[in-house]
Amino acid sequence: QVQLVESGGGLVQAGGSLRLSCVASVLTIRTYSMGWFRRAPGKKREFVATISWNGGMTDVADSVKGRFTISRDNAQNTVYLQMNSLKPEDTAVYYCAADRDRWEGVVHEYLYDAWGQGTQVTVSS
């Protein structure tokens, strides 16, 4: 059983930055694809970013391209989401997810089999 715990959310003004962290409580996440998703009020959960097992491949949603960066530290069992130039429309609960069956990075939500509880990010205008 993989447990994922997100942290780093909070309230920030538009144009500001936050870094989210996701720590996994397993021996290693070295072989897992990892991802970040978000759910804004009244909307469905959506893909934000994914990273392959060794960090060699990353992909981010068009809505955050050029502003958000995903990275990982397998030695620390941690995945990060650096969020810059935040906008009010980035306000959402952000979720970390793990896909234990694939190495290459995964965009599709239904392929992930472990999820964190989420961390709230609020961007004020």
Image (cartoon, grey):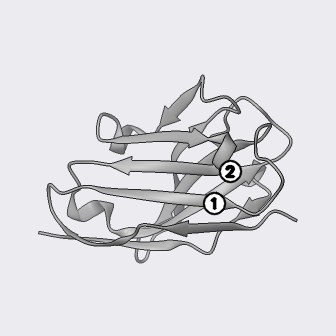
Is there a contact, CB below 8 Å, between mark 2 and mark 1? yes
Q: In the visual, does 93 lie left or right of 11?
A: right
Name the residue carrying label 1.
Answer: 23
Callout count: 2
**Where 54 sits versus 80, above or below?**
above
Going by the numbered disc 2, the residue's amino acid type is Asn
- Give the structural element (helix, strand or loop) at label 2: loop
The location of residue 41, given as percent across then percent down, is 40, 76
- On the rendered image, what quadrant is the C terminus found in? bottom left
Name the residue carrying label 2.
Answer: 77
Residue at image point 57% right, 41% down: 72
Residue at image point 64% right, 49% down: 76
Residue nearest the observer in this picture, 55 or 47:
55
Which residue appears farthest toward the top when viewing the image?
A: 56
Residue at image point 67% right, 28% down: 54
**Where 69 sits versus 112, above or below?**
above
Neighbour tally class for label 1: few under 14, some 14-19, many 20 plus, Cα within 10 Å: some
- On the rendered image, what quadrant is the N terminus found in? bottom right
Rendering quarter of residue 96: bottom right
Rendering quarter of residue 15: bottom left
Going by the numbered disc 1, the residue's amino acid type is Val
Residue at image point 60% right, 41% down: 73
What whole-number distance in Å separates the C-alpha atoms at marks 2 and 1?
6 Å
The location of residue 74, given as percent across then percent down, is 67, 41
Neighbour tally class for label 2: few under 14, some 14-19, many 20 plus, Cα within 10 Å: some
- Give the structural element (helix, strand or loop) at label 1: strand
Rendering quarter of residue 75: top right
